[in-house]
Amino acid sequence: MGPARKILIWGALALAIAVPVALAAASPLLAWRGPVYIAAGFAGIAAMVLLLLQPLLVGGYLPGLAGLNGRRVHRAIGAVLVAAVVLHVAGLWITSPPDMVDALFFRAPTPFSAWGVIGMWTILTAALLAVFRDRLKLRSRTWRRMHSGLAVVTVLCSVIHALLIVGTMETLTKAMLCILVSLATAKALADLKVWTNRPRRRG
């Protein structure tokens, strides 16, 4: 891969991340929000950005981060993703405990709440599965399929959750970020042939 193409790939990724984050930071709605609520909201935005990076890393699409390096960064980003989700939920809990209780018990009147809660549990389950993978003695193929299945549900729920929320994120760039997350996940799973007997290794 030539240097021009590497610069193009990294530049496109930086643009895809920076534009929706910058527009969210400039949202006039932030003027009526407290610091904890704002931090919780941006933790959720960070989680969406990390969901874009994960399939790009494991698929080996980012220059300099293919193969083993990409998978190592993928694991590290996974830990950061869990932390972002925990901060998102904790911040919303601090600002409004009754609303969070309703959301966790699927009693909230807002449709996006249920999708967010399901996505939260699948992210946490995927993380626990990664931590206890060796202790559970999972076969490599079983591990890949379970982890990938949880990733698909996480992406689906997170995208729907984000699209249903009318908040600080600008509508068009939020939709574009959600589309990119979905396409990157589908591309990585297709290339790695997760649900076939002979997955193709990249890098």
Image (tube, rainbow, N blue to C red):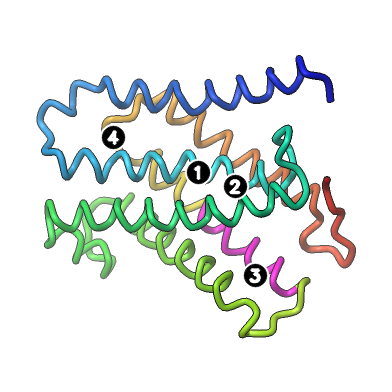
Q: Position of residue 142 (x, y in %)?
A: 73, 74
The residue that mark 4 highlights is 166
Q: Residues within 10 Å of mark 1 (few under 14, many from 20)?
A: many
Q: For the residues labelled 2 and 3, say whether their Cβ atoms are less than 8 Å apart.
A: no
Q: Which residue is mark 2?
A: 54
Asked whether the residues under the numbered discs 2 and 1 touch, taking CB atoms below 8 Å apart as contact, a structural biologist would say: yes
- Magenta range: 142-155
Upstream in the sequence, badge 2 or badge 4? Answer: 2
Q: Residue at x 16, y 44 (%)?
A: 36
Q: Nearer the viewer, mark 2 or mark 3?
A: 2
Graded by Cα atoms within 10 Å as few (under 14), some (14 to 19) or many (20 or more), the crowding at tag 3 reads: some
Residue picked out by circle 1: 50
Q: Secondary structure at mark 2?
A: helix
- Number of numbered discs: 4
Say which quadrant the C terminus sits in.
top right
Say which of marks 4 and 1 sits in front. 1
Q: Are marks 2 and 4 in contact (CB under 8 Å)?
A: no
For the N terminus, the image quarter is: top right
Residue 144 magenta: yes
Q: Main secondary structure of the magenta part?
A: helix
